[in-house]
Image (cartoon, rainbow, N blue to C red):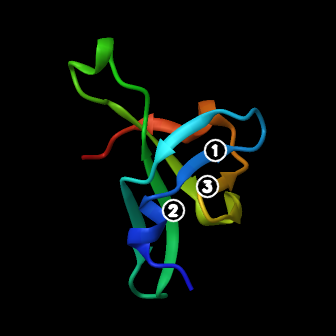
Amino acid sequence: MVRIYDMKQKEVINSNDGIRLGFISDIEVDLQEGKLIKLIVPGPAKIFGMFGRGKEYQIPWDSIKKIGEDIILVDINVDKSLVESEY
C-alpha cells in the first residue's frame, strides 16, 4: 500500500529516455469510479524559474510502469505529455 504523501516524495523518471521529470505536485482522481486517473508533475521552469511554470506533465495511470522505494518509472512521450497547466 502506498499513500499519496509517500508518492510525492518519489522522483518521476521516464524509462524511454531516462529524463528526470521531477516530483508529483498533484493527482487527478475520478470520484465516481474511485480511480486515480493521472499524476501531475510540474514542467520545466521558465527563464531561470523566475516566472513560474506554464506547463506540466500529465501522466496517465496506465503509463506508470513501476513504483519503487525512491522513484516512479513511467513510459511516456514527453512532448505529448507536457501540456499547458490548467490552474
Q: Position of residue 46 (x, y in %)?
A: 33, 18
Q: Mark 3 points at which residue?
A: 71
Q: What element carries label 3?
A: strand
Most extreme residue toward the top, as rendered? 47
Residue located 30% across and 46% down the image: 86
Q: What is the three-letter code of the residue carrying label 3? A: Ile
Residue located 42% across and 72% down the image: 4
Q: Name the residue under label 2.
A: 38
Q: Which corner quadrant holds the N terminus?
A: bottom right
Q: Where is residue 49 in the image (x, y as percent from the top left)?
A: 28, 21
Rendered view: 72 above or below 22? below
Q: Nearer the viewer, residue 66 or 85?
A: 66
Rendered view: 15 above or below 5? above
Q: Where is residue 11 in the image (x, y as percent from the top left)?
A: 54, 49
Q: Which of marks 1 and 3 is in front?
A: 3
Does residue 42 appear to the left or right of 75 in the view shown?
left
Does residue 10 appear to the left or right of 26 in the view shown?
right
Q: Distance between the residues labelled 3 and 2?
A: 16 Å
Q: Where is residue 17 in the image (x, y as percent from the top left)?
A: 76, 32
Q: Do residues under tags 1 and 3 come within 8 Å of each other at their CB atoms?
A: yes
| Numbered badge on residue 13 | 1
Label 1 neighbour load within 10 Å: few <14, some 14-19, many 20+ = many
Please report whichever mark, 3 or 2, sits nearer to the chain's N-terminal start: 2
| Location of residue 64 (image quadrant) | bottom right
Q: What is the three-letter code of the residue carrying label 1? A: Ile
| Location of residue 65 (image quadrant) | bottom right
Most extreme residue toward the right, as rendered? 16
Does residue 84 appear to the left or right of 58 in the view shown?
left
Label 2 neighbour load within 10 Å: few <14, some 14-19, many 20+ = some
Q: What element carries label 1?
A: strand
